[in-house]
Amino acid sequence: MSRATLVVMAAGIGSRFGGGIKQLAPVGPNGEIIMDYSIYDALEAGFDKVVFVIRKDLEKDFKDVIGRRIEQQVEVAYAYQELDDLPEKYRDKFPGRTKPWGTGQAILCCRELVDSPFLVINADDYYGKDAYREAYSYLTSMADADKIQICMVSFILKNTLSDNGGVTRGVCRVDENDMLADITETRNIGKDGEGAVIRNGDGTETRLDGESPVSMNMWGLTPAFFGILESGFEAFLEETDPDDLKAEYLLPTIIGDLLERGDVQVRVLRSRDQWFGVTYREDKEAVMDAVRNLVDKGVYPSVLYRDR
């Protein structure tokens, strides 16, 4: 079997891990959290290693809540995303900064731990089984090419919205060959019947096609991408104003820039599965209902991992 790694970005889950953090709220019949289902689906698809990207101060609590359970099922490693994990010459440039640097830095933290094609996911998003099967198939059958090869699992915008407020999505334009043409990180997208709208700060609204493909930070990458991230991060830090405390090095923006320059090719794999996640605390009940429905239908056993 070909090797592939699952990288779970979990460094942004909050300092009170397990004490009411929305992303870690139990949603399954035996206290499972969303990550449990994501990892179960990935293992079923063929992934043979899991790397958790966490903060060092959360390590003990993280292992207590989920890490040790997963360590019994598959090879596990931990990468630590920290504010000061920067090239030395930039460590004193941002004295007011209090949070790490976004998803690009999160993946860069894994460079010593990942030596096979890998799939990146958010810790608090449920993606569905098809997404993992499609990604594994792509990652383990890539042909050599002149450009860096990437895949992105896209979702239908209307299937990724919350009933309880606006969300941020990478809205994509995909060409006739299922290759990503561009991606725009778009904030404050809300439901509007069967469609979607951007609710602008000035009170106006911009309508979006609810069938538009969007990124949910589910990227298939290879170890060659670490070199791109490393040089790009240094350029990002060089250009960032020291007073900009919210600047983030984000995967959709990084990949969008690479696309513009013609440095990568991004195959878009399409999922029609219903995404769900706990974007707002009020989403928890709907997520619990969705998980209960999947268990009732036999998509998942009532107790995950029991027979693994």
Image (cartoon, rainbow, N blue to C red):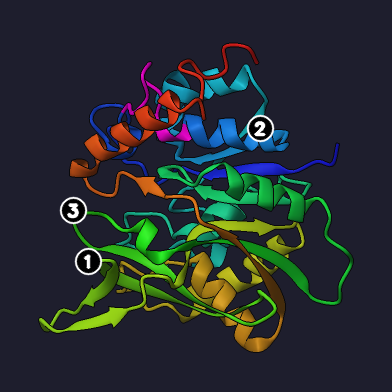
Give the percent coordinates (x, y) of residue 72.
62, 16
* Secondary structure mostly taken by the magenta-highlighted segment of the chain: loop
- Answer yes or no: is residue 60 visible: no
Image vertical order of residue 107 relative to residue 205, above or below: above
Q: Amino acid at mark 1?
A: Gly
**Where is the C terminus found, in terms of image quarters?**
top right
Q: Residue at x 76, y 71 (%)?
A: 148
Q: Identify the mark nearer the N-term, 3 or 1.
A: 3
Q: Is residue 31 magenta?
A: yes
Image vertical order of residue 11 relative to residue 170, above or below: above
Image vertical order of residue 43 relative to residue 199, above or below: above
**Which residues are the magenta region?**
26-35
Q: Which mark is residue 43?
A: 2
The outermost residue toward the front is 297
- Answer yes or no: is residue 173 visible: yes
- The picture quadrant where one finds residue 245 is bottom left
Residue at disc 3, secondary structure: loop
Read off the residue under disc 1: 193
The answer to whether the residues at label 2 and label 1 have Cβ atoms under 8 Å apart is no
Q: Please state if 157 lies on the left or on the right of 268 as rendered.
A: left
Q: Residue at x 23, y 30 (%)?
A: 20
Q: Please state if 136 lies on the left or on the right of 86 as rendered.
A: right
The outermost residue toward the bottom is 261
Q: Amino acid at mark 3?
A: Asn
Q: In the depicted view, which residue is nearer to us: 13 or 27?
A: 27
**Where is the N terminus found, in terms of image quarters?**
top right
Q: Identify the mark nearer the N-term, 2 or 3.
A: 2
Q: Identify the mark nearer the N-term, 2 or 1.
A: 2
Q: CA distance from mark 2 to mark 3?
A: 32 Å
Q: Amino acid at mark 2?
A: Leu
